[in-house]
């Protein structure tokens, strides 16, 4: 899953956010993570532990009450990112996915967090899905009596239409997932309900008025995990306003949208037609939720730790600013949560524009330490990366770092220059975007440019406004050759089939979801074979593939594994970090004032 913000030391000008499953410094109750809080010395060690993918198909609502929780008040969520869409068909960023699935859109399956670990459970479906003997169909029965936020009934055909909308890549699904195109029968050629309103799409059908059947092109043992995505929420065709749907959507979760100013804020209030008895994982404790977009993390975190004004009721989901590290590891450790993550970030290099030996030279030259120092990055937010998958992925295996992919150090400009001279590529031009209106990004880029220039590269660095960055780096035809495509990835579920195919199959090149626009027939054949295996047997095969791609192809340099953090006001309670949405379990939060 893509993340719209990261430490300024990467291609971005956003500060980092850290992600995944550990607990908080706040009180913990049913449905939340348990364990250590701020300043947790075991957090880095926990990053190397594999997540456990388990299911509880019999879990029923309502969700267990959080001890001591009360209803009322307003909670504020500060997000330095500006997600490109909040339409369920196009959501594929960590922050928008969390806001959607925790507050607005219920899906076929969802997760309950038990002792800090994700457990797949039924949501709008009565169980977690039933595969056929050959694995080529998955069947889900829908709970009865479900309603939208306007009081109208949820119908079985609304699920089908919702899935169809996720193929409308020209509009509502522009930035959405590609799994459905790969998994569902007819997905490769289907263009969605706007371009092909009369098409007979065979990827999903119905049985009676309460059963969905998904028809797959291949065996996908983890398909029911994919069914937790916003694309699996129902949308009534008669009320589809296309690109305007995100502003006033019909919701099935505990909140509805009062207003949405794109790029600024979204205000939510309770959905009175949400029935908690049918929902095993969510609560609606605050009266209102206000999500603030494109905020400055430092100012937000300072306000929170000063418990000034609405800061007392605010959660900041960004990485901690280094200037505040002593506070959250000292006197205010109870207002900070730290844990391991499902996310990793990369330095992408376009394999079609930069030769392999030049890509390796970039790796030797990259001034990791200087960039991080220049950006003022707190070490609490990251661990240097040497693989393409985060250590919390099932089956993760650390292998000796390649000398051009260490994720740390001052760089070796002499070695890089030697490689360039030998290849006749001295003076090779590297071009990329960076966020020109963010001081951290500017400082990081100064260090990056100096290191690459010293190694014999010519650098064409193109400043762009923060507001344009997400779309610019997703454009596969942009006039650059580096730092393009998805700058970071958070696995969609804790098995390799939600990491390697989406990053390295080439399917996501048009949408900017690949690393280095990499596509290789041999690697694709191996991924297809591994993807059909039982997840437990597939795990070591994914790990071996990671090493093969790093050794033979190097489409990107591993940058860092993100640590999961949250900074929160004194009135915000039950802040448990969630390993799937990679931030606090938002629907478990409550405010004391």
Image: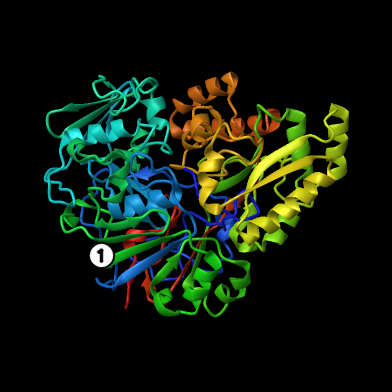
Q: In the picture, which quadrant includes the C terminus?
A: bottom left
Question: Relative to residue 395, is residue 365 drawn left or right?
Answer: right
| Relative depth, front residue between 205 and 37 | 205
Residue 310 x, y percent position in the rendering: 39, 75
Quadrant in the rendering for residue 192 = top left
Residue drawn at the location 51% of the way across and 52% of the way down: 467
Residue where numbered disc 1 is placed: 65
Quadrant in the rendering for residue 214 = top left
Colour convention: rainbow
- Residue 392 in view (yes/no): no
Residue 177 x, y percent position in the rendering: 42, 36
Quadrant in the rendering for residue 44 = bottom right
Total residue callouts: 1
Residue 321 x, y percent position in the rendering: 59, 66
| Relative depth, front residue between 471 and 351 | 471
SS at circle 1: loop
Q: Is 223 placed above or below 135 here?
A: below
Residue drawn at the location 27% of the way across and 36% of the way down: 162
- Residue 488 in view (yes/no): yes
Question: Relative to residue 589, is residue 426 drawn left or right?
Answer: right
Q: How crowded is mark 1: few (under 14 residues within 10 Å), some or many (20 or more)?
A: some
| Relative depth, front residue between 259 and 132 | 259
Residue 498 x, y percent position in the rendering: 47, 36
| Relative depth, front residue between 284 and 493 | 284
């Amino acid at each position: 899953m893509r993340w719209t913000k990261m430490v300024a030391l990467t291609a971005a000008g956003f500060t980092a956010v850290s992600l995944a499953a550990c607990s908080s410094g706040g009180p913990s109750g049913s449905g939340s993570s348990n364990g250590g809080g701020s300043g947790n010395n075991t957090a880095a060690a926990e990053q190397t532990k594999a997540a456990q993918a388990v299911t509880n198909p019999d879990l029923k609502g309502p969700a267990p009450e959080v001890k001591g929780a009360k209803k009322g008040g307003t909670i504020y969520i500060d997000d330095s990112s500006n997600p490109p869409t909040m339409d369920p068909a196009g959501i594929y960023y960590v922050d928008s996915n969390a806001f959607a699935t925790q507050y607005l859109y219920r899906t076929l399956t969802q997760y309950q967090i038990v002792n800090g670990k994700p457990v797949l459970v039924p949501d709008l479906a009565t169980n977690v899905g039933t595969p056929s003997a050959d694995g080529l169909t998955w069947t889900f029965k829908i709970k009865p009596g479900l309603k939208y936020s306007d009081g109208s009934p949820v119908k079985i055909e609304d699920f089908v239409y919702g899935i169809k909308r996720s193929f409308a890549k020209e509009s509502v699904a522009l930035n959405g997932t590609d799994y459905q195109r790969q998994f569902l029968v007819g997905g490769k050629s289907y263009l969605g309900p706007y371009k092909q309103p009369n098409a007979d799409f065979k990827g999903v059908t119905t049985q009676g008025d309460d059963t969905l059947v998904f028809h797959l092109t291949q065996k996908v043992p983890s398909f029911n995990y994919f069914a937790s995505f916003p694309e699996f929420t129902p949308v009534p065709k008669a009320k589809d306003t296309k690109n305007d749907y995100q502003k006033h959507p019909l919701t099935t979760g505990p909140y509805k949208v009062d207003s949405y100013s794109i790029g600024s804020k979204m205000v939510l209030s309770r959905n009175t037609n949400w029935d908690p008895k049918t929902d095993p994982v969510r609560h609606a404790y605050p009266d209102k939720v206000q999500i603030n977009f494109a905020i400055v993390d430092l100012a937000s975190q300072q306000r929170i730790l000063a418990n000034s004004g609405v800061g007392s009721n605010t959660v900041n989901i960004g990485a901690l600013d280094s200037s505040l590290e002593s506070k959250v590891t000292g006197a205010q450790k109870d207002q900070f949560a730290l844990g391991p993550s499902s996310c990793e970030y990369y330095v992408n290099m376009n394999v079609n524009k930069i030769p392999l030996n030049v890509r390796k030279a970039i790796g030797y030259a990259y001034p990791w330490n200087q960039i991080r120092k220049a950006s003022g990055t707190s070490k609490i937010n990251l661990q240097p990366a040497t693989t393409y998958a985060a250590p919390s992925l099932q089956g993760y295996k650390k292998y000796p770092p390649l000398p051009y992919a260490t994720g740390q150090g001052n760089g070796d400009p002499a070695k890089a220059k030697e490689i360039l001279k030998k290849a006749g590529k001295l003076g090779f031009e590297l071009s990329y975007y960076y966020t020109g209106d963010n001081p951290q990004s500017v400082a990081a880029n100064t260090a990056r440019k100096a290191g690459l220039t010293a190694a014999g590269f010519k650098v064409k660095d193109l400043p762009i406004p923060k507001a344009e960055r997400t779309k610019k780096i997703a454009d596969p035809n942009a006039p650059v050759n580096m730092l393009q495509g998805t700058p970071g990835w958070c696995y969609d579920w804790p098995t390799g089939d939600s990491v390697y195919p989406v990053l390295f199959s080439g399917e996501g090149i048009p949408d900017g979801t690949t690393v280095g626009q990499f596509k290789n027939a041999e690697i694709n054949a191996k991924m297809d074979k591994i993807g059909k295996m039982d997840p437990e047997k597939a795990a070591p095969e994914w790990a071996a593939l990671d090493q093969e791609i790093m050794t033979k192809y190097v489409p990107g340099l591993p940058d860092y594994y993100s640590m999961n953090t949250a900074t929160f006001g004194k009135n915000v309670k039950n802040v448990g970090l969630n390993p799937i949405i990679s931030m606090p379990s938002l629907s478990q939060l409550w405010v004391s004032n």
